[in-house]
Structure formats: C-alpha cells, structure tokens
Amino acid sequence: MRSFLVRVVATTLLAGSLAACGKSAPKGPPAAVGLFTSASDCASTNKATLDECKKAIDGALAAHEKTSKVYISERLCDQQAGPGRCEKFGDEKFRARLAAFLVTFSKPVTGEPLYAPKKTDVVGYVTANNAKTYLTIDETLIVTPAAKQIAYSFASTKGRR
C-alpha cells in the first residue's frame, strides 16, 4: 500500500511539473513605444529620464552607423531610399538619412533608427530594412508633435495615410 501511495504522489508531482513546463509567469502590459526626434523629445513624455533617452538614442545611432546600407552614388541611394532621403558620409559614400527614433520604454529603454518611407503617401517612418512601418496615426504609439512634423515633411500632399 505504501509503494502505491508513493507512486501516486510521484506521478501527480511529475504530471504537475510537466503541465507547468513551457509556461512563464504572467507578464504585465507591454512597454510603451514612441516616435521621437531627439533625446529631449523622448524625455518630454516623462516615460524616461533624459539620460535614459540619450542612451537609447545613442544605441539607435550606433545601429544606424553599423547596419545602414551603403551606396556608391547618390543616384543609387535615391533609387532605393527615395529622392532627397540620402546623406553623404565618408569618401563619396551615401546612405539613407536618419529621420527619427523608435524608443521602447522597457528596462532598459531602447532605441531603433527610423527612416523616411520611400512611398510619399505614407506619414510615418520605416525601419532600416523596411520590414516595419510606423504611422503617426497609430494610437498605440506615442508620437510627439516634432515627430509628426518631420513625417509630414516627407509625405506628399496627396493620399496621406
């Protein structure tokens, strides 16, 4: 009888531990995310300190320097990024001009470089590889007036969305 009870308890414990396998503790709400033009623009939301925003934006700048695609001519850059959306750097090299920053108010606060979209009917920003577009009308994002103003400056007056 005792060995039967030991097996029942062991089986129950094993089943309970397997049922919990792969499950994590419940997470809180997702971190706030926003579109910003500078560290002070980011800090103006009071979601992070100026220092935290500076570190996030420094990280985004480093990512821009490290991962942005380099073109040998302005013409090639304009073809890929859109006219007027490129910058010259180094010895006759070109890349898409950094337009804004995506800041996630997690611990630590993180930043990602954003660029003007090639399509002029989009009021927002795109990631370096154009994998994601962030629209200024997205109500899940914090979008400062400065970030909206720059996004509108890249969009045409027709078909804005």
Image (cartoon, rainbow, N blue to C red):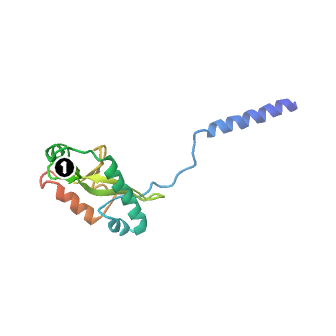
Q: Where is residue 51 in the image (x, y as percent from the top left)?
A: 42, 67
Q: Mark 1 points at which residue?
A: 92
**Rendered residue at 18%/45% (across/down):** 77
Front position in the image: 104 or 12: 104
Q: From the image, which quarter does the N terminus lie in? A: top right
Q: In this view, does 133 lie to the left or right of 154?
A: right
Q: Position of residue 63 (x, y in %)?
A: 35, 51
Label 1 packing within 10 angstroms: few (<14), some (14-19), many (20+): few
**Rendered residue at 19%/49% (across/down):** 92
Q: Where is residue 76 in the image (x, y as percent from the top left)?
A: 16, 43
Front position in the image: 29 or 101: 101
Report whether residue 136 is seen.
no
Front position in the image: 64 or 107: 64
Q: Is residue 57 left or right of residue 12?
A: left
Q: Position of residue 95 (x, y in %)?
A: 23, 49
Quadrant of residue 140 within the rendered picture:
bottom left
**Rendered residue at 29%/62% (across/down):** 37
Q: Is residue 11 above or below residue 123?
A: above
